[in-house]
Image (cartoon, rainbow, N blue to C red):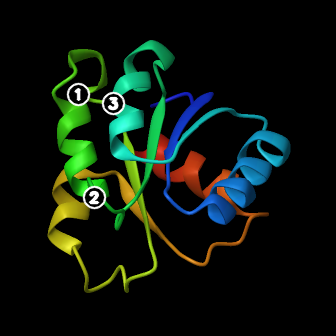
Amino acid sequence: MVQVRRILHVEDDPDIREIANLALAELGGFDVLQCESGAVALSKAEAFAPDVIVLDMMMPGMTGIETLAALRKIPSLAQTPAIFMTSKNVATEHQDVIQNEAAGAIQKPFDPVTLPEQIRRIAEAS
């Protein structure tokens, strides 16, 4: 079971980053590193050593799927639970990737009050 303390959050939308940071850092008490792109996440993730990686599925440049694939090549992150956040219908869109590559998915818009517990529950079940 994963003990969640440090979350790497990769999201291109600044408003969503701000809401998620308030939810995760202030309400959830997590240490959160936010990155606005996959490229930035790749440059910072290994040093941060997250317990969980939370990624927007659809981002310009590197998508969340591409970002996760690149992060998985870093040995210390190869087994880190990943959770996708998506505005797409999780039940139908990218279900194969979610089942095979991630611990789970969270539908956007998300509830900031319940987001910390959702992430904790998905990560600990992985």
Amino acid under label 1? Ala
Identify the secondary structure beneath mark 2.
loop
Q: Position of residue 40 (x, y in %)?
A: 41, 35
User: Quarter of the image holding residue 113?
Assistant: bottom right
Label total for image: 3
Crowding near the residue tagged with mark 2, few <14, some 14–19, many ≥20 C-alpha atoms within 10 Å: some
Residue 16 falls in which quadrant of the image? bottom right
Read off the residue under disc 1: 78
Crowd rating for badge 1 (residues with CA inside 10 Å; few <14, some 14–19, many 20+): few
Q: Earlier in the sequence, mark 1 or mark 3?
A: 3
Q: Is residue 1 left or right of residue 74?
A: right
Task: Give coordinates of residue 30: x percent, y percent.
Answer: 70, 34
Q: Tell me whether the residue at label 1 lies in contact with that at label 3, contact meaning CB atoms closer than 8 angstroms.
A: no
Q: Residue at x 45, y 31 (%)?
A: 1
Decide: is 51 above or below 8. above
Q: Is residue 58 left or right of residue 17?
A: left
Residue at position x 25%, y 86% in the image: 92
Residue 42, label in figure: 3
The relative height of residue 62 versus residue 30 in the rendered view (above or below) is below
- Marks 3/2 in contact by CB < 8 Å: the verdict is no
| Left or right position of 123 against 98 | right
Q: Dot 3: few (<14), some (14–19), or many (≥20) neighbours within 10 Å?
A: some
Which quadrant holds the C terminus?
A: top left
Q: Nearer the viewer, residue 43 or 98?
A: 43
Residue visible at 68% across and 51% down? 116
Residue at 83% of width from left, 48% of height from top? 27
Separation of residues labelled 3 and 2 (CA atoms)? 13 Å
Provide the residue designation for mark 2: 63
- Which residue is most to the front? 61
Q: Amino acid at mark 3?
A: Leu
Is label 2 or label 1 in front? 2
Work out how far the residue at label 2 is from the one at label 1, CA to CA, in angstroms. Answer: 18 Å
